[in-house]
Every structure is written in C-alpha cells, then in structure tokens.
Amino acid sequence: MWIRLKNIQVYAYHGVHAHEREHGARFEIDVELEAALEEAVKIDELERTIDYVKVQQVVVSISTAKRFHLIETLADTIATDVLAQFPAREVIVRVRKPGASAGVVLDTVEIECRKRKD
C-alpha cells in the first residue's frame, strides 16, 4: 500500500544565492511511502500503520531546521530520515521550488528522490 502526502508547504531558506538564503521562499514537498499495511487494515489501528501527521512533522522539521544550498540535498535528507524513522519499504520525496528561474518564465523546479530499504 502507498501513503501519499501531497503538497506540504513550508517557508524556508534554501538556495545557492545569497538572496534566497536571506529572504527565503515557499517550498512544496510530496512524500510517498510504500509499506506492508495489511495488518493495520485488518485491525484498524493507527499504531499498526504509518502516522502521516508524524511524517509531516519530520518533513517540516528537516525543511526548517537547516539551510541547504541544493533542493536535491533537502529531498535526499528527507527521504533518508523518513525511511529510517518509519516502517516503509520505499519512499519517494519530491521537492518543488515555485518560481525558481534563470531569467525565463517557469512554474516550478522539482526534484524527485527515491530510496528503498534493502
């Protein structure tokens, strides 16, 4: 089964350029977790599944506690921590930086990071 958290929004200070690190920006983050949840479904108990509120808290904490130059590093850090803290077999993290541009019109830049437990 997959649990998907779509479009977690945080205001943070990630970026290579000084103005990004000084003024900050809004970031959008998706987290997808694949896990064996058959037991949780059978007994209908939160303790047997992945608490998505706790996943959100981890994402917000990582996103706001440290400043990253690259959103690639942010995505990788989130994926690594989520996979370590929750009983998921696989995690996909997408980080979007709306309005990021290099002099062109652009809706968003998106990074996707996939990690799997061995």
Image (cartoon, grey):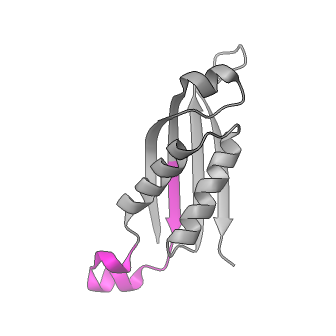
Residue 76 or 96: which is nearer the viewer? 76
**Residue at (37, 86) in percent of width and height:** 39
Q: Work out whether residue 99 can be spotted.
A: no
In this view, the residue in front, 81 or 49, is 81
Q: Nearer the viewer, residue 74 or 34?
A: 74
Q: Is residue 32 a member of the stretch shown in magenta?
A: yes
Q: Residue at x 54, y 63 (%)?
A: 82
At x 28%, y 85%, the residue is: 43
Residue at the spot x=64%, y=16% of the render?
105
Residue 53 on the magenta span: no
Image location of residue 6, percent across then percent down:
45, 48
**Left-right relation of 114 to 34:** right
Indicate the quadrant where residue 69 lies: top right
Q: Quadrant of residue 117?
A: bottom right
- Name the residue at the top extreme: 103
Residue that lies at the very extreme toward the left in this rendered image = 44
In the depicted structure, whether residue 94 falls above or below residue 49:
above
Q: Is residue 39 above or below residue 46?
A: below
Q: How many marks?
A: 0
The percent position of residue 42, horizontal first and vertical second, equals: 31, 85
Residue 61 in view: yes
The C terminus appears in which quarter of the rendering? bottom right
Relative image position of residue 52 (x, y in whole percent): 38, 61
Q: Is residue 72 above or below residue 54?
A: above
From which residue to which does the magenta span run? 30-49
In the rendered image, residue 64, in percent from the top left (x then y), is placed at: 51, 42
